Amino acid sequence: RANAEIRRISQSRGVTIGSTVAALLAMDGRFACLWAGDSRVYLIRNGSISQISRDHTEVQELLDKGMISAAEA
């Protein structure tokens, strides 16, 4: 029902509505992460932060293809 309502609102407004999610599963010293959209997953270790996921966006695709620079992104 929620999906149908979101689609209805999207169509009535003439826009695309989306969502993002990031999830971390951890057990017994192991982990798995999953994400969709432009939600990001970061690793924080020894005072350092690093991004370990990649955005699922058009901008990221253009960046990966070398069509735009990181500054343009």
Image (tube, grey):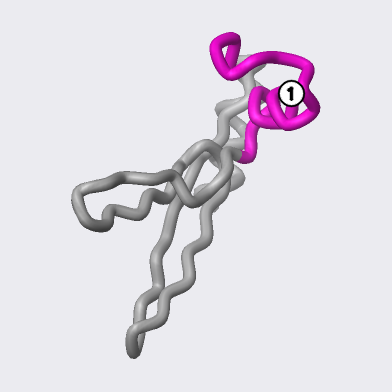
Q: Give the left or right position of residue 38, taking residue 26 as reference.
A: right
Residue 37 x %, y %: 56, 41
Residue 57 x %, y %: 64, 32
Q: Residue at x 26, y 57 (%)?
A: 45
Q: Tell me the quarter of the image containing the C terminus.
A: top right
Kindly state the secondary structure of the residue where label 1 is placed. helix
Residue denoted by label 1: 62
Q: Give the left or right position of residue 57, taking residue 32 as reference.
A: right
Q: Is residue 64 magenta?
A: yes
Above or below, comparing residue 51 to residue 58 in the picture: below
Q: Nearer the viewer, residue 57 or 66?
A: 66
Q: Nearer the viewer, residue 41 or 12?
A: 41
Magenta-colored span? 56-73
Above or below, comparing residue 55 to residue 69 in the picture: below
Q: Residue at x 65, y 15 (%)?
A: 69
Count of marks, rendered view: 1
Give amino acid for label 1: Leu
Residue 28 x %, y %: 34, 90
Instruction: Specify the principal SS of the magenta part.
Output: loop
Q: Give the left or right position of residue 67, taking residue 46 as reference.
A: right
Q: Nearer the viewer, residue 27 or 12?
A: 27
Badge 1: few (under 14), some or many (20 or more) residues near its Cα, within 10 Å?
A: some
